Amino acid sequence: MHVPVTEPRLDAVPQGARRALVLVALALVAFNLRTPTASLPPLLADVQSALGLSGAALGLLTALPVLCMALCAPGAHRLAHRLGAELTTLCAIGLVGAGALLRLGGGSAPLLFGGTLVAGVGIAVAGVTLPSIVKERFAERPGAATAAYSVPMMLGAAVAPATAVPLADALGAWQDSLAIWAVPALLAAALWAPLAVRSSRRRSAARTAAGRLPWGSRSAWLLAGFLSLQSMLAYAYLAWLAPAYEARGWSEASTGALLGVLHLAQLATALVLPWLADLTRDRRPWLAGAVSCTVLGAAALFAAPEAAPWAATIVLGLGLGGGFALALLVLSDLAATPAAAARLGAMTFLLCYSAAATAPVLVGALVDATGYGLPFGLLAVVACAELALATRLRPALRGSVR
């Protein structure tokens, strides 16, 4: 007698285990959303020596993913509407892996730039889809789900630069060090694929208009303003904190350790604060606490840079990590539906990553003109402005973006 063989179905898995599987897949996807960008800066000297690139070309190479995160965000939400957030995420993480693999041909400048561009597009698309997935699948505990993908994202941003040079030494070439990040990306794609296929099968054949970005929403502008200031601070300190202390006579090893401390502090609050914020309806106390740390750290690095730089950097990192993770949670709060979350994410990331791309350039110009005092003072002012915006993200705005 013929016994039909049935494929194992995700539906057969208990709901708790199914949700845990989604969180694991979400975390692995998120881990790959910073590795292509963060793995490059420690190897820039080798890249320049091998390819003879100018300083401007190197700047463009490092800025490409950030520019993609801004410019590709609006198109990402339309793609997610057509294909579904899960299937679009699968395509996005596939692009990240493909971009990393293209870097194996980094001995050719076009392939290096092309791989970076492809990975940047994938990062941009996934950045828009993940908040909508959280909104749809974890509406009752968005803080926990937000932590589950924001922490791995920051972990990838910390691990990639720390291991870039050792990997280049172990593998024998800087191209191999850049390309090795295709492995976790392809692993994430393999784990995400069953979720994407299942979601695609369940999508209704009926289609509605993708909808406009919420340019007319005050809530959307408020969140975009908050996250823009947050991103400007994060990218400015990432670019200029180490050079500022090298100019004061610190060794490269010491400034590298200082950046490592900054990353670790961000991980701590990104992990804890979204979980705690789930306990209350009002996110403002947690936001204010996190951004107050940013203000204190920025003020200390400006007013007394030699007094306690390690402590100031830790406090700054606690603020930056908590502020970013909580902003993603607020994004889920403000959106009325998963589709609205994708549109809000597209608008917000367009603006905030545009600001993030310009911040290091502006700080660099001021450093050239005046030294480190004025630009670090202005960063402290930006942190104060971010704190003012944090107090306006009140519970009454929940579900106001449609």
Image (cartoon, grey):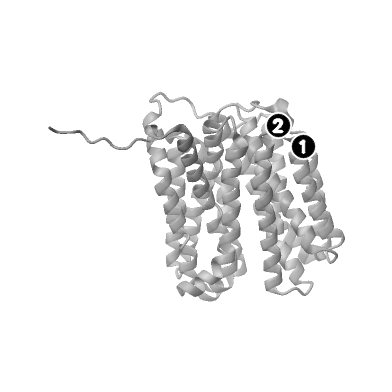
Looking at the rendered image, the disc whose residue lies closer to the viewer, 2 or 1, is 2
10 Å crowding of disc 2: few (<14), some (14-19), many (20+): few
Q: Quadrant of residue 393?
A: top right
- 220 vs 170, nearest the viewer: 170
Q: Which quarter of the rendering shows the N terminus?
A: top left
**Side of 398 relative to 170 (left or right):** right
Residue at which label 2 appears: 280
**Which label sits on residue 31?**
none
Residue at which label 1 appears: 285
Q: Residue at x 50, y 58 (%)?
A: 116
Marks 2/1 in contact by CB < 8 Å: the verdict is: yes
Is 209 above or below relative to 77?
A: above
- 292 vs 209, nearest the viewer: 292
Is 254 above or below relative to 183?
A: below
For the residue marked with disc 1, what is the amino acid?
Pro
Q: Element type at marker 1? A: helix
Q: Which quarter of the rendering shows the C terminus?
A: top right
Residue 239 seen in this snapshot:
no
Percent position (x, y) of residue 339? 53, 30
Q: Residue at x 85, y 65 (%)?
A: 307
Q: Element type at marker 2? A: loop
- Number of marks in the rendered image: 2
Q: Quadrant of residue 156?
A: bottom right
For the residue marked with disc 2, what is the amino acid?
Thr
**Side of 158 relative to 377 (left or right):** left
Q: Residue at x 66, y 33 (%)?
A: 220
Residue 130 seen in this snapshot:
yes
Q: Quadrant of residue 103?
A: bottom left
Percent position (x, y) of residue 321? 68, 49
Rounded to the nearest whole Å, what is the CA distance between mark 2 and mark 1?
A: 9 Å
**Side of 69 relative to 247 (left or right):** left
